[in-house]
Structure formats: C-alpha cells, structure tokens
Image (tube, helix red, strand yellow):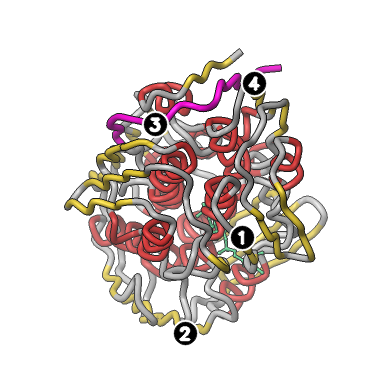
Amino acid sequence: MRRLAIYGGRPLQGELKVQGAKNAALPILAATLLTDEDCEIANCPDLTDVHAAIEILQSLGARVSYDGSTARISPSGIRHCEICEELTLKMRSSIMFLGPMLRRCSTASIGYPGGCALGERPINLHIQALKRLGVEIAEDEFGIRAKIQKFQPRILTLAFPSVGATENIMMFCAVSQGETLIYHPAREPEIVDLQNFLNAMGADIQGAGGDVIHIRGVAKLHGARYVVMPDRIAAATYACGVVACGGDILLKNAVAGHLPVFLDCLRNMGAEVIYEPDSIGIRMHGRPFAVGHIRTEPYPGFPTDIQPLMMAATLKARGTTAFTETIFENRLCHVNEFLKMGAEIETENCTAVVRGVSNLSGTTVHASDLRGGAALAIAALSACGRSDIEGLCYIERGYEKFVPSLRALGGDVEEV
Ligand code: UD1
C-alpha cells in the first residue's frame, strides 16, 4: 500500500505556488456542457477528482485533452446525458453535472454521488430546487432520472446555503427563458468563480458572493478560455503547516481576501501574516497560542474544510482550543489518529477540545478523508520521529504534487 513517510521536527521555509482550486475547477468543468463550442480551462489542478470529472465528460461524448494544467474541452459531440454509478461514485461533485446535463439534453440520468464519507451528504436541496424550476425527477436505488417538463423561472430560497445546490441552479438557469433569483445562496469564492466563467461564456449572472444571485437566462452560451482561481484550502493547508512547525513561507498565487477568518485566527495564534496582492507570507516562531473556540460555518465563517488542518496546527499550542463542526456530522475522524501521536483531545458529539501538548510522537496513522489526511501530514511534520500516513489516495483527491510541495518547503517527506 502506498503511504507517506514523514520525519518531523523541521521548520518550513521557502516559496510555493498554490495550485488552482479544486472546488472551482469541478463545477467549471461541468459547466462546459452548456455550450457546443470549445472551452479552455487553465490552472486546472492535476488531481484525481479532476481526472474523474474529465472521465465523465469523455463518457458523455466530449473530446477532452489535459496536460496537467490546461483542460481543452470540445463538447459538440455530446449526444446523450447519462452518467453511470461507476463514474458518479468516484466523487461528490458528480452531482454538479445534473443541472448542465438537463439543460443540454432536456433529460438526464445520473448515479448517486460518492466522495469522502463526512456524513450523510444528502442532495435534497438540489432536487427540491430543480423541481421548483419545472423539472420532473424520479429517484430509485440506482440514481436519479430527470426531465424538464416546463421551465419555470422562480424566486428560490435555499433552506441552507449549499455550495453544490447553488452551483447546480446557476448552471441550470444560465441558459433559460426568464429570470431566477436565489436567496440565501452559498457565498464561497468558488461560487463567484463559477459566475465569472459562466459570464465569460455569455451568461448574465450577478450577485454571486452576496445575499442574492440574479440569473437572467440567455438563449445560448459560447466557448470561453478561463483561468481557475487559486485554491484557498490548499493555501490554508501549507499555512497551517508553518504554524505547527514554525518557519517562514511565501504562498504565491494565494488571495488573502478568500481566507478572512482563518488568517485572523493565525494572527491570534502568534503568526505574522504578510498580505500582498497575489501572495501571503506566514512567519511563526515558537509554539503557537491556542485560539479559544472555532465553529465551522458557511462562508464567510470558518470553513469546514480547514477545521482538520487548523486542529493539526493547535495540537502543540499553548492552551486549549475547542472545535465545533456544524456542517458535516462525521468530520472528526482525524481526532483518533492525532491521539495515536500523543495529542490530548476530548470529543463530545461534534465538538473536539484540544489541550496543547509540548510534543507529538511519530507513528503510523490512517487518512480516511481528503482534508483529514492532509491534517495528519501537518501533525507528522510537527512530531518527533517518523510517521507513516496510510490512505494517500484521499489526499490525492485534492492536492496537486503534495509530496514535492512539502519537500519544497523543507519537509522531510517521501512516498513509499
Ligand atoms: C462543497 C465543497 C466541500 C465543502 C462543502 C462545504 C466542492 C466540490 N466541495 O461541498 O469541499 O466541504 O462545500 O463548504 O465544492 N446538504 C443538504 N442537502 C443538500 C446539499 C447539502 O442537506 O442537498 C448539507 C450537507 O449534507 C452538508 C451541508 O449541507 O451538511 C453543506 O453541503 P454543501 O454546501 O452542499 O457541500 P458540497 O457542495 O457537497
């Protein structure tokens, strides 16, 4: 079994160019179904989830070339809109293809999405919104069959600001007759990136990132060239690494404005944060301070994806930090692995209370989801001795060149 071997105890130093954002690239790839013309998606990160999205596009009949950075998609050959469960189970974001497929073929069938096991992860908000917009949907044990009955533009209010549901609605309504408003949408920067891509294709969408998204449907979209935004979660990962280990790093292609609450926390922990237009510098000397209570929330609150990473950065902090996970009910799996390394953590329901210790000891630990896996790598970098991290395939879902990136920052890491 492939694993990471990490010898901890070194500070992190150096510069790193942050990859393109996974969570922006995946819906953008799905949105290329909305045109017949060629699209070129640059800064598209080289990850297993991106490869899974490309496989889906190809299975539908699109021609796709990918050189590890730019994806070129020719969707004109797509004649059917069905994705089998074998492909959809490879990642959660497969559900993002439902809205664009429906728009392209008027009918669509799709297996249920897979992805990291962070909890139940229902898709009821996607289904409810599409039904309200005039789509007939039938579900059985194998997946979803959907058909546009009569498109009805609407004012939609989401019961929860789901990222995926917001994106599905935006893509479905971009090419339509009439205006749709989404109240209480997700406000993540990746939603803004999707809006920008759709508008580059000729859509007329405003308000992403704010309280209401206004979609004026257009008759047709054209091809576009687009550069995917930087990955704020990858940037936060390396930033947590330097807080845990000490050192001085410069993250290039990183936007501080995408990480407001997180960077405030780092400053409270004693890190020096240097803000530049397209980069973030982080300096840390000595043990970090604990940060009180972190509660995950939809953007602009503290991101759930950064919770495991931040927890890794607090394991050796001076004082106690509590984490309450409010987005996913099963997102504390990394706690048991941290305990094996000597961390002191008590959990009750969705809250974990970390009492900082002066040292962690390297050992064998097992990743069971993407961000939890990266968090184990951070803990290992700050521990004494060797750690072996199993479950590398989870980390590869979301991190491009993870091992070379950590090595570029001086981490003693190898894949074995
Ligand atoms: C996206 C991100 C993921 C991040 C998450 C929350 C991508 C590719 N993935 O996932 O990295 O952790 O946002 O920031 O962008 N929910 C429902 N019904 C639904 C949809 C969601 O109850 O129909 C619930 C989920 O179970 C979860 C919460 O809403 O508890 C957030 O989910 P959502 O925002 O939809 O996350 P994803 O789009 O799956």
Q: Is mark 2 within 8 Å of ligand 1?
A: no
Q: Is residue 324 left or right of residue 287?
A: right
> Which callout, 1 or 2, points at the residue further toward the start of the chain?
2
**Does residue 97 show up?**
no
Q: For mark 1, give the secondary structure.
A: strand
Query: Dots 2 and 3: beta carbons under 8 Å?
Result: no
Callout 3, which amino acid? Leu
Circle 4: element type? strand
Quadrant where the C terminus sits is: top right
Residue 360 covered by magenta stretch: no
Q: Which residue is mark 4?
A: 3
**What kind of residue is marked 4?**
Arg
Local packing at callout 3 (Cα closer than 10 Å; few below 14, some 14-19, many 20+) is many
Instruction: Work out how far the residue at label 1 is from the one at label 3, CA to CA, in angstroms.
Output: 24 Å
Q: Residue 332 location in percent, x, y? A: 70, 53
Classify mark 1: residues with Cα within 10 Å, few (<14), some (14-19) or many (20+). many
What residue appears at the point 76 percent right and 44 percent down from the top-left corner? Answer: 336
Q: Which residues are magenta?
A: 1-17
Nearer to the camera, 389 or 214? 389
The residue singled out by tag 1 in the image is 320
Closer to us: mark 2 or mark 3? 3
Mark whose residue sits in front, 4 or 1: 1
Residue type (three-letter) at the residue carrying disc 1: Thr
Residue 12 is marked as 3
Quarter of image, ligand 1: bottom right
Residue assigned mark 2: 154
Q: Nearer the viewer, residue 34 or 129?
A: 129
Which residue does the image show at 52% across and 47% down from the upper left? 313
Select label 1 or label 2 by which is in front: 1
Q: Nearer the viewer, mark 4 or mark 2?
A: 4
